[in-house]
Image: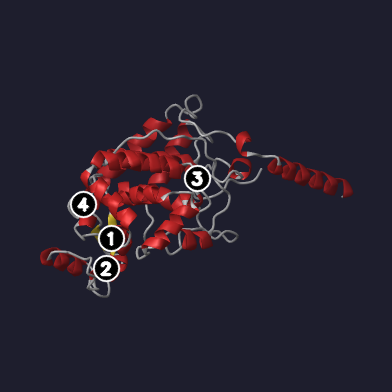
Amino acid sequence: MAESMSVILLLLVLTSYKMSCLHAQDLPILMPHYYEKSCPCAFPIIRNEMHLALLKDPRMAASLLRLQFHDCFVQGCDASLLLDDTPTLRGEKTANANINSARGFDVIDLIKTKLESECPGVVSCADIITIAARDAVLLSGGPYWEVSLGRKDSSTASFNDANNNIPTPNSNLQTLITSFQKQGLSTVDMVALLGGHTIGNARCQNIRPRIYNNSASMAFSEPHLSMVKAACPPSGNDNGVWPLDFPTPILFDNSYYINLVRGLGLLNSDQTLYSEGSETKEIVESYAHDPLGFWKQFSESMVKMSNIVDPLTFVTGEVRKNCRTVNDPL
């Protein structure tokens, strides 16, 4: 018994030493060709499954993009969002920012199943989210950017951080700036990344504060406003949806910013970019006039966000066999 305890203590000391000696320069470096030899079919499989998913439901592009945003803002980009609740783990799916909103988990499951059949235990769920989000934008007519890979999947999740770190649809400008700064993202990154709202829908529950107050910044035409209110009455139909970018809801363009300049932002947290701050207003105006400038900055900011990784994940993380659950211990 004493001998067994000694072995356990030795393992704990070695693990502690390994983690304490781990410096940034010692970490595995994320790289674009990480799966070039171990799983060369990873990119084609993910692209094909995303193409099929968008053919069935064009909204899925925005959903997969949102998955990466909501995952990376909690513990870094480690697929913690994908974990289901268990008796010993409270996941992030039921946090306020995700419940009845985050979707696309079945698409990730399908991609993971295909990859496991080709390259068992190789491609992490965190990397799947990263590639799928990029392909979602590309397949919606948006820009391409090179993704760096090699992330590990966490064995933990944080319900509390999901509630605290992810901005709400009614956040004011300072709250938004603070939330992004906490992740090491600048105001420019913030305005560009929120441009992802050029695709997808918002739930009625999140739209009402915008359409049922007479804000001076709201410039919806009466026919448009009447349509939105018909879809989202003052009460009921909380999970009904309306396009965030009404003119081109499935095309990744810069009309989101054109809408903000016109006072047509559907969420308070969107319109505040133009209505509350001089710096963000200038950025919005520049993207409204320069779609390629928006694409360039969005791509750079997506790379920056996707590289938010907790260094300890490289030590304690794993490549999950099923994205919804941690691997069984050996």
* Residue that appears at 49% across and 31% down: 31
Secondary element at tag 1 = helix
Residue kind at label 3, given as amino acid type? Ile
Q: Which comes sooner in the sequence, label 1 or label 3?
A: 1
Q: Do the residues labelled 2 and 1 touch (CB within 8 Å)?
A: yes
Question: Looking at this view, is 105 or 292 the one in front?
Answer: 292
Q: Around disc 4, counting alpha carbons within 10 Å, would you say few (fewer than 14), some (14 to 19), or many (20 or more)? A: some
Residue kind at label 1, given as amino acid type? Gln
Marks 1 and 3, how far apart in space? 27 Å
Residue kind at label 4, given as amino acid type? Ile
Q: Mark 3 points at which residue?
A: 308
Secondary element at tag 4 = helix
Q: Mark 4 points at which residue?
A: 258
Q: Around disc 2, counting alpha carbons within 10 Å, would you say few (fewer than 14), some (14 to 19), or many (20 or more)? A: some
Marks 2 and 1, how far apart in space? 9 Å
Q: On the picture, is 177 further left or further right than 219?
A: right
Marks 4 and 1, how far apart in space? 11 Å
Query: In this view, which residue lies farthest toward the left?
Result: 223
Q: Name the residue under label 1.
A: 271
Choose top left, top right, bottom left or bottom right for residue 101: bottom left
Is residue 199 something that shows in the picture? no
